[in-house]
Image (spheres, helix red, strand yellow):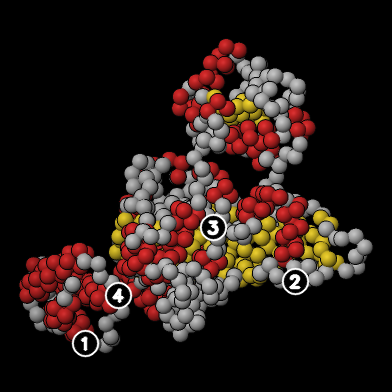
Amino acid sequence: MEGKIETQIMDTMPEGKEGSSVKIKVLFFARARELTGLSEMPMEVSSGSSAHDCLNDLVAKFPSLEEIRGCMVLALNEEYTTESAIVEDKDELAIIPPISGG
Amino acid sequence: MVEVEELRPHADHMSTIEDSDSVASIVARITLFNAGFEEHKQHFHHTQLHGTVGRDFDCIENTLDELKHKFTQLKTQLKALGSESRNGTLDVAKYRAKDDLASTRYHDPWALKLEEYKRYGRQLIMPEVGMPGQLRLKASSVLIVGAGGLGCPAAAYLAGAGVGKIGIMDGDIVEVSNLHRQVMHNSAWVGKSKAVSLGNALRLINPLPRYEIHPYHLVPENSAIAAGYSMILDCTDRPSSRYLISDMAVVHGIPLVSASALRTEGQIMVLNDPPVSSDSEKAGPCYRCIFPRPPPPESVQSCGEGGILGPVVGVMGVLQALEAVKVIMRPPDRPANPPSLIMFSAYGSQMFRTMRIRGKNPTCSACSSDTTITRQSLESGSQDYMAFCGALEASDVLAAKDRVSVMDFASMINRSGTPVNHTLVDVREKPQFELCNMLGSVHVPFSLLRRWKNAEEATTALSIDIESHEPIYVVCRLGNDSQATVNKLRELGIDRNGARKIMDIKGGWEAWRKDIDQSWPEY
Ligand SMILES: [Zn+2]
């Protein structure tokens, strides 16, 4: 059902590294939301991971995201970020492809 | 060239009208001035002028407006005088008192016409607007590209607010399927120009602004049109026009308010604010700084394909008007807001989110110092926006032998009644399937089947026997997804290397409606 926030737990923690992970929230907008079928999703990655690492994990889980990888804008905690930014615990990583319609 | 110097003495002369001048002499002089003015205006429109001359021109036109206003007042006075004297009740003392008051300069000339005070009163009394804000609105000129779901509300509010000049550019015609969201058009105007329709509606809202109607599509070759404006609103619906309009804003040095909407979501940004030409240190980013690479064509859907909720695009258009008046009314000494992207999700847990976006990209291909995009290169047509954004290949993905025409499919239906000797797979999304469908068809939305990873998922969803020889026909709305589905089913091995026929119905239900069954709904 559209509008209802579907969430899904995703554990991408490498084994044997417990205790050194961060939990973030990924927000999907526009085409990213259509391709994943999700509005948002909690995600656990090893600490020190970059936005780039998070994206790689996401594309592995949702291969169709590859389609918009080249045109999406990333925002970390509602602020523009680059793929090299390191994500921290409780961060919000937004995936924003352009909307072209009107 | 318009000889502005030549116009000036006339204007100065006209502005020295004294109340003691006879009405007849004022009429004569206004008529004379008017004729000269119209001549120069014609001349002006035939030459492509802008910049300071354009501003002088506006200034002269304002003077003319004020003179006309004064003339009307004098005429009213004269009429009152005449009727009183005819009734034989002329109170000379009373009239003289009024006359004295009128000739006493106890205030400076009003900055606005009386009807403007009245019309804009509710916004004039706000500290955000006031006289300075209203005068800035009046001196501004906004080009609105796209007279659709965004352009309709945006233009309506800008016209209402008293923007001095509004340009409307759109080469499309009004269609009945536009009217659920493009609220300034009406059913009587279906089949006619959107730009003209919107212009007519705006004149009814507020006759005071100047309206320029451009009833044709924006292409690089006619982008010089932006020279006559101090701001652009991007109310279009495709990536190629978004990049073109951004480049126009950059080369002409004017701010851009860019908005978009699809389904239940929208985005809006104020770009090139302040423009690159002003102070490159403080200049705001352009569309290319934010989205340097266009979305791949397969990820782009128009509102016709993906759908749009009317109020969603309405919200975005209204926000566009709001951002535009905020930029226009901003005092020169106040800095622009930091660049941001406002995202609207009608069904999101949070309807509005404001994301801070990056500033100017120092290596941007359009707005950095080493750009190759100039006004000249733009207008010569050497920038290929279609090629830059790419286009989906023409809809013939499959070979002719793998496709069946609606005629041939109809004959199969007629022979066997409902499909019994074959499987008909309808791959439209659920809402579309529920609008209209054929009895006995199997429904699997394309968005679901494109994620299938093995043959079992397919055979289960389609409830087919993998060993069967019954042909599979795939249909969608227009005949694109159906072809992609045929390829997908082959990849999964459902055709057993050609042992089983899998074909798409060419042109989809739209072709079916046109050629076979006119009672099939058009949507
Ligand atoms: Zn730029």
Q: Mark 3 lies on which chain?
A: B
Q: Picture coordinates of residue A92 (x, y %)?
A: 73, 66
Q: How far apart are marks 1 and 2 (CA)?
A: 73 Å
**Which numbered dot is residue B294?**
3
Q: Which of marks 1 and 3 is in front?
A: 3
Label pair 2/4, CB-CB below 8 angstroms: no
Residue A37 seen by the camera: yes
Say whether residue B195 is left or right of residue B33: right
Q: Name the residue under label 4.
A: B51
As rendered, which of B498 and B244 lies closer to the eye? B498
Q: Picture coordinates of residue B147 (x, y %)?
A: 40, 53
**Which numbered dot is residue A86?**
2
Q: Picture coordinates of residue B500 (x, y %)?
A: 67, 23
Residue B126 seen by the camera: no
Label pair 1/2, CB-CB below 8 angstroms: no
Q: Distance between the residues labelled 3 and 4?
A: 33 Å
Rate crowding at label 1 as few (under 14), some (14 to 19) or many (20 or more) other CA atoms within 10 Å.
Answer: few
Say whether residue B393 is left or right of residue B143: right
Query: Judging from the image, what secondary structure is the residue with disc 3 in?
Result: loop
Q: Name the residue under label 1.
A: B104
Q: Distance between the residues labelled 3 and 2?
A: 26 Å
Q: Which chain carries label 2?
A: A
Q: Which amino acid does label 1 sit on?
A: Thr
Rate crowding at label 2 as few (under 14), some (14 to 19) or many (20 or more) other CA atoms within 10 Å.
Answer: some
Quarter of the figure with the N terminus of chain B: bottom left
Q: Which chain carries label 4?
A: B
Q: Nearer the viewer, mark 1 or mark 2?
A: 2
Q: How far apart are marks 4 and 1 (CA)?
A: 39 Å
The residue depicted at 60 percent of the width and 12 percent of the height is B416
